[in-house]
Image (tube, grey):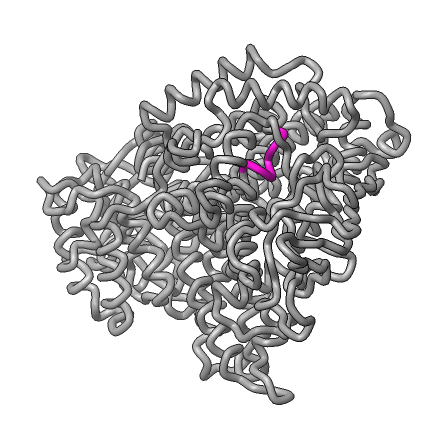
């Protein structure tokens, strides 16, 4: 056990820190989300620069254009990105979910066609999993994927798709068999978002901006070679995607929480908080942050030993989301009524935005209820609740 | 960064678990010593194993899980740091021939007559007061607080063992009436030892708390899998399973904090103090909550004297009350973070 960086990690961290200071575009510092066309334009360029410097696909195998590094480097990368309040690579869905799924299940021609452009951010990916009628119960998706002649035809509606409004490709989970078969009837496709019949409608969220979208598919033709895995074998492929969703994601979350706790402490110090109850709540958030950080280190040790993310990923997501909701609420309580009328880019406006945005944290990427089910059933071995 | 245990450390954990499965009573102390646990961090030259606090932490976690009743916490966490000033005793601790505890408080005075030190006054609450061979005593001498070693035999010292909620670790009070004592460390060296003892004790209890919570969780999960109501195991109801999931999550977070604290102590890291306080505050509260949830999941049975859960609950409450409440520990953290 050694909780310090080893010499190589320390050197990697130092180089990255210097690189970030020199390269994060001014317009993207203090990053709070990809809203607005200006940020997006900067984002493409920023992602390309990350890729050129070797920071995209750190853990991807070298044969697919990655760096082939151990997971700990991805952890350092995510920590440093958060510390610099720098935006992630614009292609997070491609890098973290679509790419690893293609590496695991794709044919050589699919790997050649997709992977390099994910790294370079030439192609941005989105995820077409959730539907209006299928949220937590993902296997109930109803979007049709029918083989007609030598191509698939897709009909249906997807929802909560981040990046869909700028995406070039979509990983889509649909149904190709009779509705009676649940998991066995699912098929996993790569869909070109520029195909005729694809319509993207942004969804305005509680904060007023639109980070995610609805996608409508009407008789969308998809070439047969875009199939990932087998017809009817989509569930297994989707599980690969979801396990990667929570792989080293915990480090990004703990990094973001580190920034948030730091800002909360700064706010409380500036306002010279003396209320014992408020101070107790600040201390709780500080302790929770340390707990999450070291739980991530434990998860990392396990990931490096076994190659597969453990249940700690669910723990990290669950606790981060609840911590972020508590601490942003605490911040607007400290600020008081000012936070209700805040605009511009000062601290009150920042916290007002963060507090509202945090309500999505316990819903997106697995609701807290589903995560507790996962822990109860897969970790504790309790009987299924349904 | 490497948060993994060495094969030897994993072995120690496995050995501790299988031993304590059968022997958690006080009579097993000599065997504990033979396994090398009492001398884990004592240098090899003094008969110990020359290991670090991380190995001791592993043992503490397992002792908590087994609700071990012997004076390991008292001897190894509370007394050992001061006993390093008495190298002749270290070998006896390592061999299991000598146990001790810590008697703190502000009311004991030390006075010198010739080449002898005499103690007078009543101590605060002392863990395992009735069963140990000696007391490390905080006492006010002519120059301030020092650390003294007093042995209870030879009369004059009156020991009252009190009816304690956790009967497996009773608290007592000791009243000294001019008892002979040996000076271990005078001020200012004593202050340093007292601070490092507190860090070790808080971290040790954080590990015990993790062990307690883990066992309460196991009992709760086992019951939820087997107990059926309305035709299904009660663990199939989310009102039950989500409580247990919360215990799992909190116990894992507490374990992370506890090993962070152990590592900081083993490495003499600058954050050791804060880490130990944070770990104890979080782990103690989590262990209390873990036991309360497990009792609830067990229904009426969890409320009975015959079921083992109440003993775990009482140990968790004992831990929570040690040194300061978790709320008071968080006030320390707030001070460091907000006023430092």
Residue interval drawn in magenta: A90-95
Residue found 40% across the figure and 60% down from its top: B211
Magenta stretch holds residue B173: no
Q: Is residue B213 left or right of residue A304?
A: right
Above or below residue B243? Residue B262 is: above
- Quadrant of the snapshot with the C terminus of chain B: top right
Q: Is residue B226 left or right of residue A181?
A: left
- Quadrant of the snapshot with the N terminus of chain B: top left
Above or below residue A44? Residue B161 is: below
* The one of B328 and A65 positioned closer to us in this rendering: A65
Residue found 46% across the figure and 22% down from its top: A54
- Whether residue A77 appears in this view of the structure is yes
Residue found 67% across the figure and 75% down from its top: A180
Indicate the position of residue A53 as horizontal and vertical percent values.
Answer: 48, 18
Above or below residue A65? Residue B226 is: below
Majority SS type along the magenta span: helix
Indicate the position of residue A350 as horizontal and vertical percent values.
Answer: 77, 28
């Amino acid at each position: 056990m050694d909780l310090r960086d080893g010499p190589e990690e320390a050197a990697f961290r130092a180089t990255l820190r210097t690189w970030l200071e020199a390269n994060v575009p001014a317009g993207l510092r203090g990053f709070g989300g990809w809203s607005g066309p200006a940020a997006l334009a900067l984002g493409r360029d920023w992602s390309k620069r990350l890729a050129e410097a070797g920071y995209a696909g750190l853990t991807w195998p070298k044969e697919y254009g990655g760096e082939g590094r151990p997971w700990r480097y991805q952890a350092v990368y995510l920590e440093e990105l958060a510390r610099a309040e720098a935006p992630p690579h614009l292609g997070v869905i491609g890098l973290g979910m679509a790419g690893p799924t293609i590496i695991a299940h794709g044919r050589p021609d699919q790997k050649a066609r997709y992977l390099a452009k994910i790294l370079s951010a030439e192609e941005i990916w989105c995820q077409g999993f959730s539907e209006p009628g299928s949220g937590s119960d993902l296997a109930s998706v109803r979007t049709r994927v029918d083989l007609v002649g030598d191509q698939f035809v897709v009909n249906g509606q997807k929802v909560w798709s981040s990046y869909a409004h700028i995406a070039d490709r979509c990983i889509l989970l649909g149904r190709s068999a009779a509705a009676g078969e649940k998991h066995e009837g699912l098929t996993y496709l790569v869909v070109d978002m520029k195909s005729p019949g694809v319509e993207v409608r942004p969804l305005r969220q509680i904060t007023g901006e639109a980070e995610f979208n609805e996608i409508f598919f009407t008789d969308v033709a998809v070439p047969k070679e875009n199939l990932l895995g087998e017809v009817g074998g989509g569930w297994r492929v989707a599980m690969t995607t979801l396990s990667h969703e929570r792989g080293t994601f915990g480090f990004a979350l703990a990094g973001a929480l580190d920034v948030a706790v730091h800002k909360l402490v700064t706010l409380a110090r500036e306002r010279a908080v003396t209320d014992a109850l408020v101070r107790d709540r600040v201390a709780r958030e500080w302790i929770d942050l340390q707990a999450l950080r070291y739980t991530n280190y434990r998860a990392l040790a396990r990931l490096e030993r076994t190659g597969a993310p453990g249940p700690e990923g669910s723990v990290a997501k669950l606790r981060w989301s609840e911590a972020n909701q508590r601490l942003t609420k605490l911040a607007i309580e400290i600020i008081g009524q000012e936070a209700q009328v805040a605009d511009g880019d000062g601290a009150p406006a920042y916290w007002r935005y963060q507090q509202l945005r945090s309500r999505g944290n316990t819903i997106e990427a697995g609701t807290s209820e589903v995560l507790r089910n996962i822990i109860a059933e897969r970790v504790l071995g309790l009987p299924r609740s349904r | 960064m490497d948060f993994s245990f060495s094969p030897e450390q994993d072995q120690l954990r496995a050995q501790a678990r299988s031993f304590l499965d059968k022997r958690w009573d006080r009579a097993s102390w000599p065997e504990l010593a033979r396994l090398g646990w009492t001398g884990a961090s004592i240098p090899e030259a003094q008969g110990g194993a020359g290991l670090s606090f991380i190995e001791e932490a592993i043992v503490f976690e397992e002792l908590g899980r087994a609700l071990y009743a012997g004076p390991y916490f008292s001897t190894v966490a509370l007394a050992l740091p001061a006993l390093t000033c008495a190298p002749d005793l270290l070998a006896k601790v390592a061999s299991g021939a000598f146990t001790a505890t810590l008697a703190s408080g502000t009311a004991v005075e030390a006075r010198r007559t010739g080449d002898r030190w005499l103690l007078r006054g009543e101590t605060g609450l002392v863990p395992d007061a009735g069963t140990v061979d000696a007391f490390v005593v905080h006492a006010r001498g002519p120059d301030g607080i020092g650390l003294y070693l007093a042995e209870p035999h030879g009369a004059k010292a009156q020991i009252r063992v009190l009816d304690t909620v956790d009967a497996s670790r009773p608290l007592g009070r000791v009243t000294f009436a001019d008892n002979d004592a040996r000076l271990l460390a005078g001020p200012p060296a004593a202050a340093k030892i007292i601070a490092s003892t507190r860090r070790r004790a808080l971290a040790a209890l954080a590990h015990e708390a993790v062990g307690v919570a883990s066992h309460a969780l196991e009992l709760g999960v086992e019951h939820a899998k087997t107990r059926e109501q309305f035709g299904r195991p009660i663990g199939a109801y989310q009102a039950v399973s989500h409580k247990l999931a919360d215990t799992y999550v909190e116990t894992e977070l507490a374990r992370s904090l506890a090993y962070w604290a152990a590592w900081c102590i083993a490495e003499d890291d600058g954050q050791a103090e804060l880490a130990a306080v944070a770990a104890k505050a979080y782990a103690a509260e989590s262990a209390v909550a873990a036991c309360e949830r497990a009792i609830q999941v067990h229904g009426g049975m969890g409320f009975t004297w015959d079921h083992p859960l109440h003993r775990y609950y009482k140990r968790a409450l004992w831990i929570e009350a040690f040194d300061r409440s978790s709320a008071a520990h968080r006030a320390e953290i707030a001070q460091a973070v907000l006023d430092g």
